């Protein structure tokens, strides 16, 4: 047990350094913060009651951007880069299991998501009492994205392929943010991985989180977590096929 923890700790340190050193992953972590700062500046003059609604929309949008961009790119590009450099083969020869490698990548991704979420929240200057639900639902809604990214990371042969695979994840994560623009999107959005997350945050802001209205988005989010975790558990051994 101690040896496993020591290996995992070393992997987490290595993966965190890789995230900072890789320009693509670093930029994807900075983009949600930059967009949030830009949108906050654009809507800074919104008066009266509309300001609260705009602030809530910015919170949901920043969570979706962070989950989609950070959750996917920090995993897909990292795994693809390790395949290109044959780092995975070296780790496995050093008696590091695929499960430990993927667990490290997931933990680093969640840490990056948490840091970016906090930065976005501070940039938009939202009320501090909204920080706890903002972070809680942000992490909860990111779990399916991280699981999907791990699965696609197993299939990605190189960083170019990883870039292609990341696009649908980012788009799916962002779709619920545009539900107000189209009835079809509004019908589909609640059933997407980040749709439940955004609905839960809106209910929390309205003080209705502990009502029956929260059951459906919570169940949808948990269903996505269970499904993606189950599929991941069945397919993660493909990591041993070092391309």
Image (cartoon, helix red, strand yellow):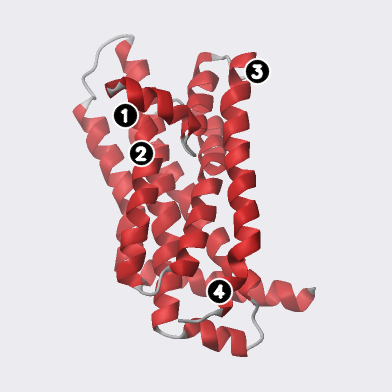
Q: Which residue is mark 2?
A: 174
Q: Residue at x 42, y 55 (%)?
A: 72
- Between circles 2 and 3, the one closer to the viewer is 2
- Height in image: 64 above or below 49? below
Q: Residue at x 58, y 50 (%)?
A: 228
- Between circles 4 and 2, the one closer to the viewer is 4
Q: Which residue is mark 1?
A: 178
Q: Which residue is mark 4?
A: 239
Q: Which residue is mark 3?
A: 210
166 vs 44, nearest the viewer: 166
Q: Quadrant of the N terminus?
A: bottom right
Say whether residue 18 is visible: no
Give the mark nearest the N terminus, 1 or 3.
1
5 vs 231, nearest the viewer: 231
- Between circles 1 and 3, the one closer to the viewer is 1
| Label 4, residues with CA under 10 Å away: few <14, some 14-19, many ≥20 | many
Q: CA distance from mark 1 to mark 3?
A: 26 Å
- Between circles 4 and 3, the one closer to the viewer is 4
Q: Secondary structure at mark 2?
A: helix
């Amino acid at each position: 047990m101690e040896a496993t923890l020591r290996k995992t700790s070393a992997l987490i340190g290595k993966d965190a350094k890789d995230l900072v050193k890789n320009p693509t992953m670093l930029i994807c972590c900075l983009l949600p913060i930059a967009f949030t700062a830009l949108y906050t500046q654009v809507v800074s003059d919104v008066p009266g009651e509309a300001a609260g609604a705009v602030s809530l929309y910015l919170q949901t949008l920043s969570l979706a951007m962070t989950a989609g961009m950070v959750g996917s790119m920090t995993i897909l590009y990292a795994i693809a880069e390790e395949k290109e450099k044959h780092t995975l083969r070296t780790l496995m020869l050093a008696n590091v299991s695929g499960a430990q490698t993927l667990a490290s990548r997931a933990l680093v991704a969640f840490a990056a998501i948490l840091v970016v979420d906090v930065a976005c929240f501070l940039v938009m200057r939202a009320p501090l009492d909204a920080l706890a639900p903002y972070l809680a639902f942000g992490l909860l809604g990111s779990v399916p994205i991280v699981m999907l990214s791990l699965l696609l990371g197993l299939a990605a042969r190189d960083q170019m392929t990883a870039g292609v695979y990341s696009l649908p994840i980012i788009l799916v994560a962002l779709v619920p943010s545009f539900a107000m623009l189209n009835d079809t999107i509004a019908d589909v959005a609640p059933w997407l991985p980040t749709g439940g997350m955004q609905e839960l945050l809106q209910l929390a802001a309205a003080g209705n989180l502990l009502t029956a209205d929260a059951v459906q988005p919570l169940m949808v989010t948990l269903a996505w977590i269970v499904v993606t975790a189950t599929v991941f558990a069945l397919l993660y051994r493909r990591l041993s096929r070092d391309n």
